Amino acid sequence: MISLSYYIACAVVLYIIGLYCLASKRNMIKLVMGLEILVNAAHLNFIAFSAYASPSYIDPFGHSIVIMSIGFAGCVTALALVIVTYAYKHYKTLDVRKLRRLRW
Amino acid sequence: MFTLTLDALLVFMIGTPVVGWVIRKKGYPKVQGIYALAGLLVAGYFLYGLSSEVSRKGIVLIAGFPPFNPPLGACLQIDLLSVFMTMLYIVIGLLTTAYSIKFMERDSSLTEYYTLILGLVAGMTGVVFAGDFFTLFVFWELMCLTSYALVAFRKQKWESIEAGFKYLIMSAAGSATILLAMSFLYGMTGTLNFAALASRLSNAPPEGWLHITLALVIVGFGVKAAIVPFHTWLPDAHSAAPSPISAILSGVLVQTGACALIRILLLVFGSTQLAWQTTLAIFAVFTMFVGNLMALLQNDLKRLLAFSTIAHMGYIIFGFATVSEEGLAASLFHVLNHGIMKSLLFLCAGAFIRQTGTSDLRKLRGIAGAMPITSAAFTIGSVAIAAFPPLNGFWSEMMIVAAGVRAEMIVFSALALANIALSVVYYFRVVRIMILEKPTKVSRKATKAPMPMLIPILVLAFLCIFIGAYPVPYIDASSKAAEAMLNIGGYIHAALGGL
């Protein structure tokens, strides 16, 4: 059996990839994908921890959280894509840097 | 199922589309607003019953039957803090919904609007009711999703789309961070029930993963609570949303983030050996300074109010960071006062925008001549929020500073006092522009705000004066809520019993 720490390391790396994606990408669709990567890092962590909770069985608690959270992530993505669609209709571009009319 | 209050909100939320579908053929768009008002009133009535039960028992536990009772199953654990916060949500929700009936009459898709408002109030209520991290996360996501949709509600405008997208990306990243923190807590203890987490992590040594989890919790909730440097979504979202929504977002939603943060810090990390109080106080002081200094530079009324919200989040988090009963009580009292004052100011700003079509302060010069009642209410709100003695803001802001001094955070308290002085400058600038300067073309042409919009404004202005004149019962209520917040032993006992 693979040691638990590999899974945690993988989740942390995924989380960092997600943050990097949010910070550096220009395409709005890619930003939404970055969000998905962030959420999935946490999901992977939950699944790994529930599998290693006890040597004899898999804890279903982590799985139930992940199933609910996948649903929420789906809702957030759907809403984000709706907003992206409206932004595209308005600006005819998906480049998030063109959306800089807001003052800081 | 989830206590009658929350059930009423959820049932009316699901019922709103049905009502909207029925009346679409007949064409009485106001019926939906009245239906949403009725929903909030029913929830308020049930909350009254719940509050007497909570004050009798201390903590009401709503959980499944064995084996799905805590710590395994999800549960709601309602104490005086939850009741205190929910009272505020329902009052602000009622007033803003009443205001929306007139304010939003020119907009389309009102059915969705009222559904989302009820969903937002239900989500916030669930967040303060939750007894475990999983339930909290579910209601947290309900609150976040509805608020994203409400910020981007006027989807024809570029401002709402941009602000909505920025808010969605930042806040969803914050939620993902909370989820990651949850997964680490689950990995360390095998449970997510607050009471079980508190008892299993008590006296835990400050080792690596616990530090990381603490940082993730502060960042995740800090995005919603607008702690600097995670505040950049707030001025955009609050100024792009329709004004009644800004009132809810600014008045109660960011405070919900702060309350959830402090509840988790106290329950889960309160008994560990981590020193998070000073960290939180430093964040709070930065938040105050950035909010106040940026508010000085704004020429847009709603952005100014939004930056002032950031500054006030700084005061509230500073009060929480003292972790004394006084500091928590002062902060909760300030949550109440700030909710009332900031909703008042945003609703007045909404009235100005509706009557003149602009929120630019340079064009709103001398508006008091054309809209005397709204301007008078705005002045009352500004004087209250700038902490002038007879009004409500004074009491809570001074209580926060005093609690800071007594918790031996004297430098931070002095900085908070300096910030309160700074906020006087920009609020008086706004009042001066509105009352003393010569009217411009835009402000001369404005007409008085219609009566249905003035009633919520006047109720809130009256509350500012009333709480200021007679603050004792409200201070009592907030100190009882603070006592409930610090009663961690009782919280654990109520959930786990003899375990």
Image (cartoon, coloured by chain):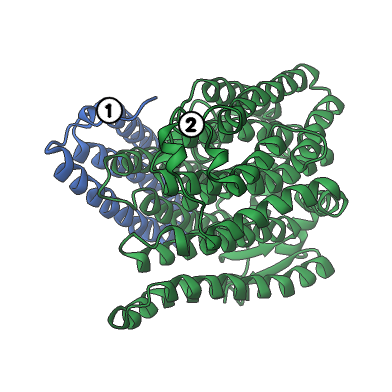
Chain colours: A blue, B green
Q: Are marks 1 and 2 on the same chain?
A: no
Q: Is residue B335 above or below residue B462?
A: above
Residue at left 67%, top 63%?
Answer: B77
Quarter in which the N terminus of chain A is drawn: top left
Q: Secondary structure at mark 2?
A: loop
Which percent across, then down, holds residue B386? Answer: 70, 31
Q: Secondary structure at mark 1?
A: loop
Q: Amino acid at mark 2?
A: His
Q: Is residue B110 visible?
A: yes
Query: Which residue lies under the disc numbered 2?
Result: B231
Name the front one of labels 1 and 2: 1
Which percent across, then down, holds residue A69? Answer: 39, 55
Residue B453: give its label. Answer: none
Mark 1–mark 2 Cα distance, whole angstroms, equals: 17 Å
Residue at left 88%, top 50%?
Answer: B472
Quarter in which the C terminus of chain A is drawn: top left
Characterize the local packing of mark 1: few (<14), some (14-19) or many (20 or more) Cα atoms within 10 angstroms.
Answer: few
Residue at left 52%, top 22%?
Answer: B294
Q: Is residue B3 visible?
A: no
Between B115 and B33, the one lying in front of the other is B33
Q: Are marks 1 and 2 in contact (CB under 8 Å)?
A: no
Which percent across, then down, holds residue B146? Answer: 41, 56
Q: Is residue B317 left or right of residue B250?
A: right
Among the 4 quarters of the image, the one containing residue B1: bottom right
Q: Is residue A10 above or below residue B284?
A: below
Between A64 and B23, the one lying in front of the other is B23
- The chain under label 2 reads B
Q: Is residue A24 above or below residue B258?
A: above
Residue A100: give its label. Answer: 1
Q: Amino acid at mark 1?
A: Arg
